[in-house]
Amino acid sequence: MLLDMGAHTCNSSAWEMDTGRSEVQAGLWAKKMDENVAEFLRRIILKIPLCKMKTILEAWDFLSEDQLQTINLKQRKEFLAQEVILLCEDKCASLDDMALLDIVYTQLHQHQKLWNVFQMSKEPGEDVDLFDMEQFQRSFKSVLQRALKNVTVSFRVYEKNSVWIRVAWGTPYSQPNQYKPTFVVYYPQTPYAFISSSHLKSTVPLLHQALKVASKHQQIVQLDLRSRHLDSLKAIAFREYNQTFENYTSTMSLHEESLGLEINLNSKIVHENTEEKVRIHRVTQETFGAHPQPQLEFAQYELETKFKSDIAGGILADRKEPLRCLVKFSSPHLLEALKSLAPAGIADAPLSPLLTCIPSKKKNYFKIRDK
């Protein structure tokens, strides 16, 4: 019995020595990778939800299928991150590889950023050039690097032939900040680009210049259109939101459709006039269509007007400054909420054009002034 216990103790000590040796060896392996690159990778892994970890790592297409199979996705993220770091160490991963992983992550978490829409234009009569993706990337990168020494630019061509651009900005005296990059989504041979809000306002003109040169446009302007839903912004910019409506066919009469709509209405609201109900449904369909609406979270209206009155000596009669008012409508799905107002009996139909023109005017920021 004593011999068995001694043997067990020796085996345990040997196991602990091996474990300790493995941990030290793992630490040495991790140190082989550049510390900044390893830390960048660690932070990316930690912010990826476990349920999407496999999907994102596969889309990254850096690790082999066999390497992905060895990753234990049921362990704590800190250990998982270390495991991925060791695998990337074996493949001599670089900062560019990590930037590409960050792009993949952002593509699947687009709603975490506020996107701005920009429209470019050419000179009148100028021909449309054939697009060369490699030339676009070279031109874009060279414009930024000529103007700013410390900047890293990464590209990923995505579905539907869009190109995602990630720009990490530095200063003449500091390295690029990899944790606060700017993202640009550009669809070749279109005048539109979608840019995430940047914490460095001074870099905006340089970014615009790079876009114009690379895409061969002369001017670029920012539209009054912003959202966290990139796909909805694209649908509005390219007028894709009404395709469902244009292809929509129904054999039901308008009266039958309105009766079917009753199922979704608040049961506490009583409609006494069937003809009025049919009219509201018709006007709503004509205004919004039968298709799902693009998803926007808000619309902002800034009013600026002069006080006008025929009564002399009023309190505001001598006021020279205009009256200003800011009204903001917000909802997780604003356009669908507006579409439901009249059928629900909350508002008259048709709604004000200021509320219904958002997709057609391609803006959700409005400034209303006296004519």
Image (cartoon, rainbow, N blue to C red):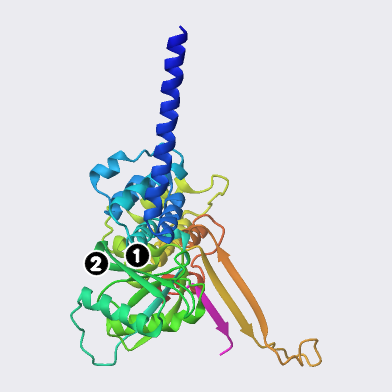
Tell me if mark 1 has few (under 14), some (14-19) or many (20+) residues whose alpha carbon lies within 10 angstroms of its own.
many
Q: Give the range drawn in magenta.
A: 364-371
Tell me: residue 130, above or below residue 103.
Answer: below
315 part of magenta stretch = no
> What label sits on residue 205 in the rendered view?
none
- How far apart, in angstroms, are the residues tagged by discs 1 and 2? 19 Å
Q: Earlier in the sequence, mark 1 or mark 2?
A: 2
- Left or right, 3 with reference to 56: right
Query: As shown in the figure, which amino acid type bears the numbered disc 1?
Result: Tyr
Figure quadrant of residue 135: bottom left
For the residues bearing labels 1 and 2, Cβ distance under 8 angstroms = no
Label 2's element?
A: helix
Residue 281: where, in percent of width, then height? 43, 58
Tell me: residue 12, above or below residue 280.
Answer: above
Front label number (1 vs 2)? 2
Residue placed under numbered mark 2 in the picture: 161
Figure quadrant of residue 323: bottom right
Label 1's element?
A: loop
> What label sits on residue 241 in the rendered view?
1
